[in-house]
Amino acid sequence: MLNRIILMGRLARDPELRHTQTGTPVASFRLAVDRDFKDKTTGEKATDWIDVVAWRQTAEFVSRFLTKGRMAVVEGRLQMRDWTDRDGNKRTSAEVVADNVYFGDSKRDAEGGSYGAPSGGYGAPGGYAPPAAPVGGGYSAPAGGDQFAELTEDDGELPF
């Protein structure tokens, strides 16, 4: 059996951190995840609002570093939970239990800045910023937005 889910979306609100009676941290938040296709009548992408629960160190990470509007990548499993509402009606909710949560953007992107590289490029989610050239050479900075730098000199000492 396989129950694995990976989501990328923006936090709909700040995470809520609580602790169980035994002191175990648990954070809950909601992700707004856009669908890949547009509605034929409106021409807009529909958004799914997905509840996520994180436990222990993952909960502490989420509550400390993620805020409303930040892009996050969540790895986990889908869980169905039965509960009873105030009127005594039985309800069922679907939620994702997060095993891992990653930043989906850089802090600079979240604050409105940009590295100048296209978002969603090769490497970490949110794009790639080429490193600055070291003093004294070693490689030349990539031209035209390429994502790899070309070596300009060879020291002849390969590790293999």
Image: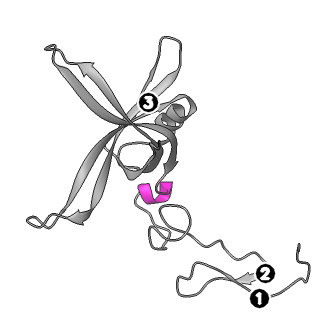
- Of 70 and 96, the residue lying toward us: 96
- Above or below, comparing residue 14 to residue 17 in the picture: below
For the point 88% across and 77% down, which residue is it? 158
The residue carrying mark 3 is 27
The residue where tag 1 is placed is 152
Q: Label 1 is placed on what type of residue?
A: Thr
Residue bounds of the magenta highlight: 105-110
Q: Determine the secondary structure under disc 1.
A: loop
Q: Foreground residue, 21 or 71?
A: 21
In-image side of 21 versus 93 (left or right): right
| Residue 35 % position (x, y) | 27, 58
Magenta highlight: main SS: helix
Spatial distance from mark 3 to mark 2, Cα to Cα?
46 Å
Residue at the spot x=8%, y=65% of the render?
A: 41
Image depth: mark 3 or mark 2 in front: 3
Q: Earlier in the sequence, mark 3 or mark 2?
A: 3
Mark 1 and mark 2 in contact (Cβ < 8 Å)?
yes
Give the residue at x 58% y 87%: 143
- In the drawing, does residue 85 fall left or right of residue 11? left
Residue 53 at x, y percent in the picture = 41, 33
